[in-house]
Image (tube, coloured by chain):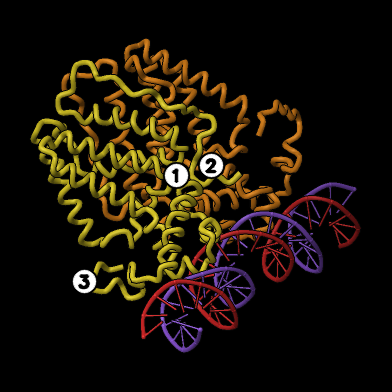
Chain colours: A orange, B yellow, C red, D purple
Amino acid sequence: MPAQPSHNPPEHTPETPPPDALRADARRNRERVLEAAREVFSSQGVDAPMSAVARRAGVGVATLYRRFPTRSALVTAAFEDQLAVCATAFEEALADPDPGHGLYALLEKVCTTLVTDRGFETVFLAGFPEALDYDRERAIAEDRLSLLIRRARDAGRLREDFAPADIPLLLLAVSGLAAQPPETALPAARRLLTYLFQSFQAHPPSRPGPLPPAPPLDLTGLHGPAGRP
Amino acid sequence: MPAQPSHNPPEHTPETPPPDALRADARRNRERVLEAAREVFSSQGVDAPMSAVARRAGVGVATLYRRFPTRSALVTAAFEDQLAVCATAFEEALADPDPGHGLYALLEKVCTTLVTDRGFETVFLAGFPEALDYDRERAIAEDRLSLLIRRARDAGRLREDFAPADIPLLLLAVSGLAAQPPETALPAARRLLTYLFQSFQAHPPSRPGPLPPAPPLDLTGLHGPAGRP
DNA sequence: CCATAAGTGGAAGACCCCCTCCACTTACCT
DNA sequence: AGGTAAGTGGAGGGGGTCTTCCACTTATGG
């Protein structure tokens, strides 16, 4: 996939039909499909069969494919809200006068989303090529993230040897928790983040701060990815 | 699956044929199958088709099933070495006169294995029911792990509020890195562990120790679980 | 009210995977 | 050497999924 420029100016990609110049009932159905997709993908994972989404939405499979040409287009669309949440959090972080607070709040927000909406990690991390404009969009994000990090470091809120790569590192680590049911995954993520944030400090206090409660995890009955009993 | 006692004393489970009272060629084939399984599962993931393993081993599918009654039996068997490595590391940790060192070395060893042999996390974490005797075996492991933790804490090598649940937490976090190619995942795991270990300290030094090099990770091109392009 | 084009459902084609079955082959023992 | 039981390969039944196709339905504008 040799990253080509590919500016497609006015069209909405060759095959994607116009966004909302749809017949009234079609638009209604489109919404029902999206809602069903969100529910099904969040509860059963992104590999849930298309027919399950269709059934839940009360429509035929063809309707799904008419609106979303491919399976992953639907997956991406279903998690657009979460992507927006992350984008917003990013903006807020950049706008925050306290860059340390901004960065930590951003990470907390993104991680919460990752761990709450099962399946979102697949979209967010694997980078469904459709998810973003890719080439440019991601490069920009990366630059701005570096900026945020540098500012937090300059403000004395991040240790000197903190690296930009530690952000994806943290995101991957948290995504490892996402396979657990949200009741477990959320406290787990909070505790993991607390541990990490304490390590990220430039000037750690002599006694580390308190931890949020431990998650209900034990070696027995961990839910790995795709258990096949 | 209501955890029943189920002591099966001498037999090797009803259907599993005796381990090595096999005809010479059969035993040879069994080895080839196992080796092929290790290669295929490690490179393509545990969901690789049985036919792929068979092809790689140069045998028919029936041979796989004759030796390993079910798919997950083969998966489990293929990762038996890694399980043994972990078990050994566990023993060593318990035997270590310095419980702090023992615990940290154990975690490092297990995490390295998790991240090096792709697919192992599925076996280790999801707990393929066949993997261990389950009921008892795991309960014992859990007890001994608690013991190890308590000793490390008493020795002043773990903060007071460290919880046993933090172990599975850490393992899950590391397993989130396992989707990356090993060249990336290994340094990533090392760095993550360093961050966490520093946070686990009961008496952190005023200046935290150095970190291992940052892994080659950026937001672009993360390999999520099961990308479907 | 009706013509028409957009929209729809469900069946069917294409593919892939697990696992079993059985006629054939091969090692082992006498 | 040859009988016998263990071992084998590959085809195929059974189940599942993605995606397409097309005759039918329905909103909408004149």
Q: Which amino acid does label 1 sit on?
A: Asp
Q: How crowded is mark 3: few (under 14 residues within 10 Å), some or many (20 or more)?
A: few
- Name which residue lies at 39% across and 40% down: B116
Decide which of tag 1 and tag 2 comes sooner along the chain: 2
For badge 3, the amino acid type reads His
Would you identify the image quadrant in which residue B32 lies?
bottom left
Secondary structure beneath dot 3 equals loop
Which chain contains the residue that carries disc 3? B
**Residue count near mark 2 (Cα–Cα under 10 Å), binned few <14, some 14–19, many ≥20:** many
Q: Name the residue under label 1.
A: A117
- Quick check: do tags 3 and 2 share a chain? no
Q: Residue at x 26, y 74 (%)?
A: B11
Of A174 and B106, the residue lying toward us: B106
Chain holding disc 1: A
**Which quarter of the picture shows residue D6?**
bottom left
**Horizontal side, residue B156 vs residue B179: left or right:** left
Q: Position of residue B64 (x, y in %)?
A: 47, 65
Q: Are marks 1 and 2 on the same chain?
A: yes
- At 76% across and 34% down in the image, what residue appears? A11
Q: Do the residues labelled 1 and 2 touch (CB within 8 Å)?
A: yes
Q: Mark 2 points at which residue?
A: A79
Q: Quadrant of the N terminus of chain B?
A: bottom left
Q: What residue type is labelled 2?
A: Phe
Q: How many marks?
A: 3
Residue B67 in percent (x, y) is at 42, 68
Image mark for residue B7? 3
